[in-house]
Amino acid sequence: MECPDGYITRLGTCFHNRVAELGVLERIFRGEYDPSLLIVYGPMRVGKSELLRYTLSRRVRGLGDIYPVLVDARAEAGRRLFENVNVSIEPVFQTTSRALSETARTLVERLSKLDLPMVSKASSLVLFIWDAIEILIRQGTISEDERIYVVIDEFHELPGYTGIRDRFRDLRILAANILDNENNPRSPWSRIRVIVTVSEGYIFARDEEGKDLDSRLTGYGARYLLVREMDPESFSKTLEDYCSSKGYRGDRCQELGEMVISIAGRLPGWIPDIDGYIVEVTLMKEVREKIERFRTILKRVSRAEGIEPRDLAKRIYNAFRSKEYYWEHGLSYEAVEELVKSNIAYRYDEDIYFGTPSFILRPQIRLYEVAAKLIAENRSINISSKEDLKRILREHEKEDREKETRLVRA
């Protein structure tokens, strides 16, 4: 496959659109926006990691003196944790003194083995980032004018934590060090900025002391970037690229697109998963499992709230379809917290770059919205065929068009 900029995603497709998100990231790299810590989130499999990898490999050149370092938190501790997008960090170890090299390698290898009371293991990673950057600066690998962007992908999967409080504390430590030294040119922290991607549950989760991420980071210069569901045209191009790479033609590709949109929405990361169980028996089994999971969580939350599951489903559905905050639909903080932690919903915002997450709700996948609607209307929730899914998709699209028409007229 030939892509205009030569970049091929891990789906095997070209990178399409994301103009708004790329615009925010480019302004950050140019220094027009200057958060100490940028938290990137969005619905699961929307493409958060791919957005950052594409930005670092294709868009940072020409934006100023920038030295990006990508930390893959999913990587096994001790194995290539650092992946510098433009210049491999491995030669840094080879060209430093043997003592420095061994110290750096030992720090990486120990990440999964450390057992330090009062200090989370990720704090050791923070210290390693500091040590590695100091080495780069001393060697002259990074010039005095370059700003260092440390991008930690999937921060929530970094191993070795004892609880959410430790994770929140590490983000606060990073932000505080940067903010406290932003006007101190002699401190390396004045040149460091940090970007992390996190799971959606992180944005609403509370630590052992009942504090959420936003309250822990208030006053430390942190900002958020929401990666949204793809627009129809960009999703269509991504799907076409995927089908082309797989040799799918005509009806096979159209059916795959319909199933992905029906089940998940326009979230590109779901394409290969749904392609993997596109055979009807397997696909319907997956659909039934997700609906049953939604019903189980709905029953648990409704018992805690003291209301009927049907009433709760109606409130959830109305919140999903609205731009109003969740409490306007009779949902409690505790109910929403459970929905977010269970990956049923995520916090949405009309803007994509902001200082405090909004309280608008959206479903993680479209099927949860469909399930809420069917339960609220006391209709059969037995989706037994692809045709059932397609019919429901058409109903939703019709409702969306009618809603847009009403808004235009208003």
Image (tube, rainbow, N blue to C red):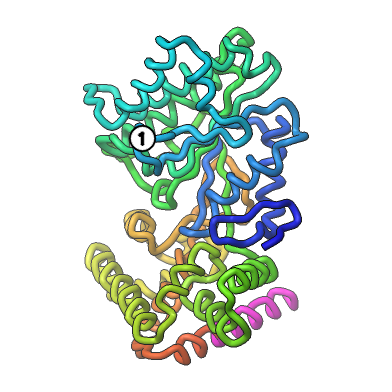
Q: Give yes or no for residue 402 being in the magenta stretch.
A: yes
**Whole-percent x, y for residue 291 in the image:** 34, 76
In this rendering, does residue 192 appear at all? yes
**Whole-percent x, y for residue 94 in the image:** 49, 19
Would you place residue 6 above or below residue 30 in this image? below
Picture quarter containing residue 235? bottom right
Would you place residue 188 above or below residue 380 in this image? above
Q: Nearer the viewer, residue 125 or 349?
A: 125
- Amino acid type indicated by mark 1: Arg
In the rendered structure, which segment of residues is drawn in magenta?
Answer: 394-410
The image quadrant where one finds the C terminus is bottom right
- Residue bearing the label numbered 1: 167
Q: Give yes or no for residue 286 being in the magenta stretch.
A: no
Secondary structure mostly seen in magenta is helix
Instruction: Please name the residue shown 63% across and 47% down the image.
Output: 54
Picture quarter containing residue 246? bottom right
The residue positioned farthest toward the top in the image shown: 186
Q: Which of 374 and 81 is in front in this view?
A: 81
Instruction: Please name the residue shown 70% across and 80% down the image.
Output: 405
Picture quarter containing residue 303? bottom left
Q: Nearer the viewer, residue 206 or 51?
A: 51
**Whole-percent x, y for residue 366 in the image:** 48, 72
